Image (spheres, rainbow, N blue to C red):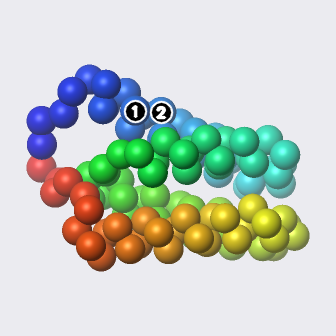
């Protein structure tokens, strides 16, 4: 898989956004997590991911959704569960780059 630096930068941006959102959710800070999750989902929808990154995104968004359910943030939890299902559908359809 030969990707441009722009793609690598975009993948790193998604990782940073979702990691920061995950940390905020783990700390119980829903208001900080909300814009990070929304921006992360916007970026991730516009790109094709390597297989491992896609699997990590599926798992990470699903786990964030579970934690948000526990915190009572039902709307944001539903968005995370929906995104995890969309990412899983992309994986099932083969919409990813094979890992090198």
Tell me the element at label 2. Answer: helix
| Residue 64 visible (yes or no) | yes
* Mark 1 Cα-neighbour bin, 10 Å: few <14, some 14–19, many ≥20: some
Name, please, the residue furthest toward the top: 5
Residue at image x 52%, y 68%? Answer: 84
CB-based contact (under 8 Å), mark 2 and mark 1: yes
Disc assigned to residue 2? none
Q: Is residue 17 above or below residue 30?
A: above
Please give the name of the residue rendered at 30% of the width and 76% of the height, measured from the top-left corner: 92
Residue at (79%, 41%) from the top-left corner? 32
Above or below, 93 relative to 46: below
* On screen, residue 77 above or below 92: above
Which one is in front, 58 or 95? 95
**Residue visible at 45% across and 48% down in the picture:** 44
Q: Is residue 68 left or right of residue 82?
A: right
The answer to whether one can see residue 63 in this image is no
Q: How many marks?
A: 2
Structural crowding at the residue carrying mark 2, measured as other residues with C-alpha within 10 Å and reported as few (<14), some (14–19) or many (≥20): some
x, y percentage for residue 16?
53, 36
Is residue 77 toward the left or the right of residue 70 in the image?
A: left
Residue 80 picture location, percent across and down:
63, 64
Q: Position of residue 26 (x, y in %)?
A: 73, 55
Q: Which residue is mark 1?
A: 10
Under tag 1, what secondary structure? helix
From the viewer's perspective, is 24 left or right of 42? Answer: right
- x and y percent of residue 65 in the render? 67, 68
Real-space Cα separation, disc 2 to disc 1, in angstroms: 5 Å
Q: Quadrant of the N terminus?
A: top left
Label 2: which residue? 13
């Amino acid at each position: 898989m030969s990707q441009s630096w722009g793609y690598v930068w975009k993948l790193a941006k998604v990782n940073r956004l979702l990691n920061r959102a995950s940390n905020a959710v783990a700390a119980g800070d829903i208001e900080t997590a909300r814009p990070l999750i929304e921006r992360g989902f916007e970026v991730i929808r516009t790109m094709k991911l390597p297989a491992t990154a896609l699997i990590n995104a599926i798992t990470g968004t699903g786990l964030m959704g579970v934690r948000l359910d526990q915190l009572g943030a039902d709307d944001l939890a539903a968005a995370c569960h929906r995104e995890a299902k969309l990412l899983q559908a992309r994986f099932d359809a083969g919409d990813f780059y094979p890992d090198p």
